[in-house]
Amino acid sequence: MFRFTTYVLAAALLSAPAATVAQYSSSSQSASAPQPANSAGTPTTPSADVTAAEAAIASSDWKTAETKLDAYLAVHPTNARALFDAGYVADAQNRLDDAASLYRRAVAANPQSFEAHISLGLLLARENKLSEARPELVAATKLDPGAAGPALKARAWRALAHIDQATDPAAASNDLLEALKLTPETPEDTLLAAELAEKTGQNDAAEAAYRRVLAKDPHSIPARIGLAHLLIVGKKYADAETVLRAALADDPNDPTLNAQLAMTLAAQNKAEALPLLQKLYTEHPADPAIARMLAQVLADAGNYGGSDQIYIKLLAAHPNNADLLVAHGQNLVRMARMQEALTVFDKATQIDPANAEGWSGLAFAASRTSRPDLALHALTMRSRYAPENASSLFLWAITYDSLHQKQQAAAYYRQFLQSAQGKFPDQEWQARQRLQILGK
């Protein structure tokens, strides 16, 4: 919800067959369309039927082109040029399974057909069959595009960059560099470069790239979203708010921008966050990210019941999500429903034994339900995954105190007082009183 992905930018790149109708014009068709080959790989002159089909393609007369190509392929089933043309016709009509099959046959008939490889790769990428698309696009980058020119080869490299970005950002960066060797950088390239830099931890480079896009196009929503995301990650909430308010002045209903603004407002404890999130939640009730943000802000505002209703709804869809269980348990604690909270925290820690917040909650609930042995176990487990803090030290102290283990209790009370530094006045007063009693 909150992160703009470059697959959105890739949509136009991957949305059409690699060849263009212009390639089938009467003046350029023979030079630009794929050339069939005989068994020795030598191009041959296309038949009158194929030429007529390509003229029909140039005028988007798909029915005529398909009729002529079907008749020709019935007699010449391995003609690479006719197979590619038929694949193009099917692709243009969104008959993707037929198109893929025909492109594959064209590749088999002529493995050196740049157009067949790139068209098949782009089609598979559009269908999210990325593992199948990648080798076809790699093959295209190794072939001479001929009259198709460097721009089409650059398109193959850019498509590879979009495919590689999720699993291998370094490879995606190299793909993009190869594309830029062939054609000038586009704003979409700069946005992709920014995201790749962020994925590899180069946040300064990513921010610079987003700002380069905005310098050329101050109203670029993707660049604003990306820059705001970086600023939020860097906890530069005021800067992020400035970027987002400017963007929302242009597009006040953009859900991602509104969600990011809500996040920055909540982080700054601004009252505007709650009504904005409530509005977003009404408009997007199925969006879990918005629901979780609203639940957290409601809890921070003291509306534990309202917050918990959202968490219960989320848990109905994801009953084994440990983080949701912990948040639900924390609301139950705030509503003094300790036995229920204990059960919820216990489930969360069973699902995710490394969840320190789950163990903290279990320790607190166990302490409040007079189960000191369970509290000690939970505190011991918590210490494996998170450092001690004032709250956990106080829990250790009162738990040992309840077990009449005076030496351990006194030691933890002292550690708590050293850590608290006046931030927990009620508990600090209690610790000092207990130390006096325990010292007698």
Image: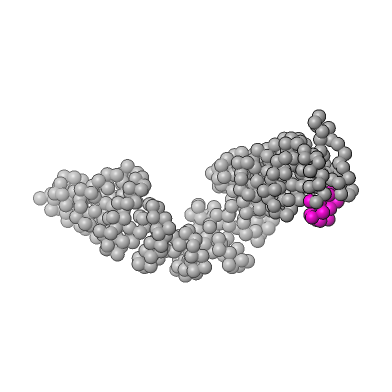
Is residue 181 among what the camera can see? Answer: no
Could you tell me which residue is drawn at 17 percent across and 56 percent down?
Answer: 433
Number of residue marks:
0
Q: Which residues are magenta?
A: 53-66
Front one among 147 and 270: 147
Q: Position of residue 30 (x, y in %)?
A: 86, 43
Front one among 277 and 272: 277
Q: Is residue 349 left or right of residue 84?
A: left
Could you tell me which residue is drawn at 28 percent across and 55 percent down?
Answer: 343
Q: Is residue 57 magenta?
A: yes
Q: Position of residue 51 (x, y in %)?
A: 86, 46
Q: Residue furthest top?
A: 40
Q: Quadrant of residue 48?
A: top right
Above/below status of 25 relative to 426: above
Q: Residue furthest left?
A: 440
Front one among 153 and 98: 98
Could you tell me which residue is drawn at 51 percent across and 65 percent down?
Answer: 284
Q: Position of residue 153 (x, y in %)?
A: 74, 42
Is residue 337 among what the camera can see? Answer: yes
Dominant SS of magenta comes to helix
Q: Is residue 413 left or right of residue 87?
A: left
Q: Is residue 129 left or right of residue 69?
A: left
Q: Is residue 156 magenta?
A: no
Above/below status of 192 relative to 301: above
Q: Position of residue 398 (x, y in %)?
A: 20, 52
